[in-house]
Every structure is written in structure tokens, then in C-alpha cells.
Image (cartoon, rainbow, N blue to C red):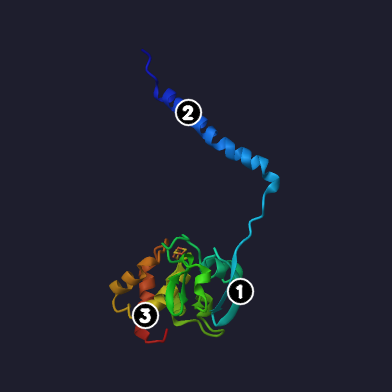
Amino acid sequence: MRTCTVDEGRRGFLKKSSAIAALYLTPSILVKAMSIDKVVPVTVAKEKLSLTINGKAYNLQVDIRSSLLDLLREEIGLTGTKKGCDMGQCGACIVHVDGKRLNSCLSLAVDNQDAKVTTIEGLATEKQLHPMQEAFIKHDSMQCGYCTSGQIMSAITCIRGGHANSRQEIKDYMEGNICRCGAYQNIVDAIIDVKQSGKTV
Ligand code: FES
Ligand code: FES
């Protein structure tokens, strides 16, 4: 009796699965081929959205599928807020909404009706950086800089919310902000510096 080899087994499996796939796929391919000249353009549903970004009022028509992050970057042109994972795991997209930090990749833009949004571009005045921006420079708290805007936005709410009483407390609060360059110690140094300075953040 002839036994089949691993390769023959694989070939058999592939043949069978191709045949099954063909059975299932053919009708939809045909349907597509037959109806190709009847394709109806997809209409994108939009909703009105009024909100304030960095002190400026916006009245927009927004794609209901758009995240707040994409609205900020693609529609408003505020590209200081970064897209890292786009799934709530890296913190690169953190902004302030009504004074609280938020992963903007996880928030539908249309859910921010009447919100007050602050991004990294809204922290400094024309003449003066925000104290946390100054501290990040002073303590060399960035390398490639990709995570930095999210880190700074979190660092500010860390102090505002009373979570900067020790290095460990700061690390716990900042754990949602990933830095692949590993600038963590310098980021904590910057936060401690601002906290000890007593400056308003
Ligand atoms: S891009 Fe939003 S958490 Fe990573
Ligand atoms: S400075 Fe490069 S990812 Fe944080």
C-alpha cells in the first residue's frame, strides 16, 4: 500500500481547498463582472460638528466614520498629534478634550460636539513655550520625537490631576505612552522638574 508523502498531502489539500474556494468565489466574481457597469458610487454620510480647537471655533461637516485624530491631522492640518498604532495602545495621539487627556484615535470626531480640544500646537504662545515643552528640551526627553506630543499632553494632565508625587506615580500614570526610543527616565525628570518649579500647567 502506498502512503502519501507530506508534500503530496499538502498538494492534495491545496487542490481541494482551491476547488472549494472556486465553488464559493465564482458566483460573486460573476456577479461583480456582470454588474460592473452598474456600480453605484458610495455616498459618505456626514454630520455637522461644532467644536473649539486650540481656542478657535470650527463648524464642520464631518465623515461620521472619521476619528478625532484623522479630523485633526487630515482636515484641520494639525499634524503635531501623531498616529502610531491607531488602536489605543501607544499614546502618540493623545490630546486634551475638555481638560482631560484622550486617545484621539479611539474617539469618533462626531462624538466631540461642542468640545474644547487642545493639541500640542495649542500649548505655546507666540513668544513662550509651555513649561512642559521647555522641560522636555532641558532634560533631553526626546530622541526621534514621534511620541513626544502625546507624552507632553499626558505629562501636563499628570501634574494637573495630582499624579506627579513620586517617580513611581508618574511612571504609573504615563504607562499608556510608549516611547520606542526609550526616553522614559528623561521624561520623568522633565515632569518632576515642572512639578517642583510650581509653574502653572
Ligand atoms: S495612535 Fe492612538 S493610541 Fe496609538
Ligand atoms: S522619542 Fe522616539 S518614540 Fe519616543
Q: Residue at horizontal 46%, vertical 76%?
A: 96
Earlier in the chain: of badge 3 and badge 1, it is 1
The C terminus - image quarter: bottom left
Q: CA distance from mark 2 to mark 1?
A: 53 Å
Q: Which residue is mark 2?
A: 16
What secondary structure is marked by label 1? strand
Asked whether 153 or 97 is in front, the reply is 97
The answer to whether mark 2 and mark 1 are in CB contact below 8 A is no
**Number of numbered discs present?**
3
Q: Residue at horizontal 52%, vertical 76%?
A: 113
Q: Which residue is mark 3?
A: 159
Relative to residue 164, is residue 77 drawn left or right?
A: right
Checking the image for residue 60, the label placed there is: 1
Earlier in the chain: of badge 2 and badge 1, it is 2
Looking at the rendered structure, the kind of residue marked 1 is Leu
Around disc 3, counting alpha carbons within 10 Å, would you say few (fewer than 14), some (14 to 19), or many (20 or more)? some
The N terminus - image quarter: top left
The answer to whether mark 3 and mark 2 are in CB contact below 8 A is no
Asked whether 79 or 41 is in front, the reply is 41
